[in-house]
Image (cartoon, helix red, strand yellow):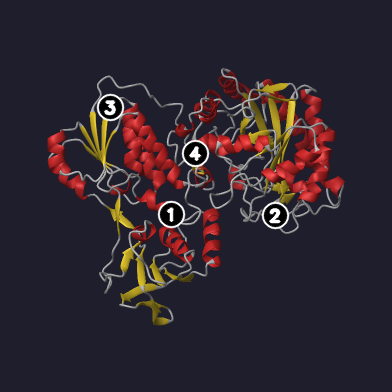
Amino acid sequence: MFDKLFSPIKINQCEIPNRLAVTAMVANYCNEDGTASDKYIAYHEAKAKGGWGLIITEDYAVNEHAMGYKYIGGLWNDGQIESHKKLTDAVHKYDSKIFAQIYHAGRQSGSLVNGGVQPMAPSAIPCPWLREMPRELTIAEIEQIVEDFGDTALRAKKAGFDGVEVHAAHGYLIAQFLSPYVNKRTDKYGGNFDNRTRFLKEIYENIRAKVGKDFAVTVRLSVVEDMPGGRDMAESRILAKLIEEWGFDALHVSCAVYGDHNRQIVSPMYVSHAWQADLAAEIKKIVNIPVFTVNRINDPRMAESLLEMDKADIIGMGRGSLADPDLPNKAKAGDLQSIRYCIGCLQGCTGALYVGGPITCLVNPSLGEEYKLDYSKVENPKSVLIAGAGPGGLEAARAAAMKGHSVSIYEKREFLGGQFRSAAYPPSKGELANYTTWVTNELEKLGVNIYLNTEVTKELILDKKPDVVIAATGGNPLVPPIKGIDKAHVVTAEDVLLGNVSVGDKIVVAGGGEVGSETAAHLGMQQREVSIVEMRSAICMDLDGVNKYYLKKILNEYEVGAYVNTKVVEILDDGVIVENSQGQFTLAAETVVLALGYKPNNGLTEQLKEIHHNVITIGGALKTGNALDAIKEGFDVGISL
Ligand code: SF4
């Protein structure tokens, strides 16, 4: 089934056992001094154990002012080598190979993460995203950074890495030099193509002179920046040929820079799977060194088909490895149902990173916890009864069953997944259902008793006498005391999404947060006339920048209207009276959809506490949150019983 995927490939002298690579992703798990922490080592070791052929680390800073994030690895001094040797030793216990990605963040950084030092760049133009003014590098500083790359590569070799990947993509310092969009220099490092590529060439030569001819040295390149005046594919073809000619051993084709809305370095679920593969294929046609492709490839069958079509030689799955570090072994065993697929939500990985935190994963709550998790079975299993089969309840059931407890989960509705089920209905969100099918499958394998259409009551608890009750009853939609809100044509967003109600052609959605905006997009795509009424100053405020960008595009495309700083005053039979700074006016509406948030549904907890001494309340039943929080909380409670 996966003949190509599980065939070896050589990069320089490094024999990689299969074509599945963990591509570089900042985890923010290292110590502040750039040394590898236990958390960081165990995180990578889990992937090696899971069968990935090649692991490329996050970007290692080449000097102490080269960092783009506070807790990334570094090999800018010899004192850092020992901890990273522990990492390579841990990975080499398995068949995997490991490369260190090395970089300088340049202007895509800030003084806050670099000890107060102003960011540096080829020219004094700020990153459109971080916006701190960088200082233009002097020739002497450029020459020193070239040396730093070579020294860092040599330290990587001493630390036991099988190779280095020079990060010349995604708008970091090397990419800044390559790009006329950022590089406005008129000296030997700027202006024409040869001058802009000089920095990369010198870095390669410096590295090669220090690590020798047999050490794998690869490069990652954004072949398309998709910024006004940025680098394009026509130029990247020429550069790819040069990269091979200089002596790089492989080329990792990627796209984009910070601030690029259309393509995104890490694409959300709104973007097509494997959309960069055609760009990799173009490069592959004109070079003879191995070519990587990456981005939104989450299924081993997709990876195999890309290899069959000769689009690339190695398939990168960064987020796929976060969601399921065991993906390669499961694919090899033909156990595709067991794979926990990345759903492209961006909530745990980049969502956490962009606010400076360590990465997590919505579907994999054990990510980053590998160093301390104990999956051994408990000596005295308990009977655990879980009320509510939303994401938190399901994850609590899975974790508790893994520890050997006897678990039963009850759901008053006829399906599993709670609000996560309806969340999969809006445009581009269908992959959310992957998680529900995966966890259901796991619960069946673990022998969890699942009861649908069954509400947990005091009587049920008195009858079953569980040792532990977990109340995971989620939240109920907020229904404020607005005149007319009890009319028959006023419905909830969840009912609309699940198709439980019929709606008219003119619709007002009250609430422009994530649920309201997505529901409006869902209805807009049905060619209905939809208006969002939001009290805050903007819609989609609770979404991260990337998901917000794509959702707003859909809303615009389907001409969904939005009234912000506007509140609903009264619901009429054929409209909604709203009010804003312009005064009161009426919007015509055959249906009014409520998407005003949720409030904890904790009534059951209060009742059960009267008759049971061990009731644990989790997720939305305790505090309004999101699926990321609920799944993590469910897992933490289940695993600690
Ligand atoms: Fe994928 Fe979402 Fe996990 Fe990120 S948080 S790895 S996008 S499932």
Q: Nearer the viewer, mark 1 or mark 3?
A: 1
User: Looking at the rendering, in which quadrant would you find the N terminus?
Assistant: top right
Q: Nearer the viewer, mark 4 or mark 2?
A: 4
Q: CA distance from mark 3 to mark 2?
A: 52 Å
Which residue was labeled with disc 2? 226
Q: CA distance from mark 1 to mark 3?
A: 34 Å
Which residue was labeled with disc 1? 425
Residue 452 is drawn in which quadrant?
A: top left
Q: CA distance from mark 3 to mark 4?
A: 26 Å
Mark earlier in primary sequence (1, 2): 2
User: How far across and how far down the image is residue 638, in percent?
Assistant: 32, 33
User: How far across and how far down the image is residue 329, in percent?
Assistant: 52, 26
Disc 1 and disc 2 in contact, CB within 8 angstroms: no
Q: In the picture provided, is 515 more to the left or to the right than 490?
A: right
| Helix, strand or loop status at disc 2 | loop
Q: Residue at x 36, y 70 (%)?
A: 591
Mark earlier in primary sequence (3, 4): 4
Q: CA distance from mark 1 to mark 2?
A: 30 Å
| Helix, strand or loop status at disc 3 | loop
Q: Which mark is residue 405?
A: 3
| Helix, strand or loop status at disc 1 | loop
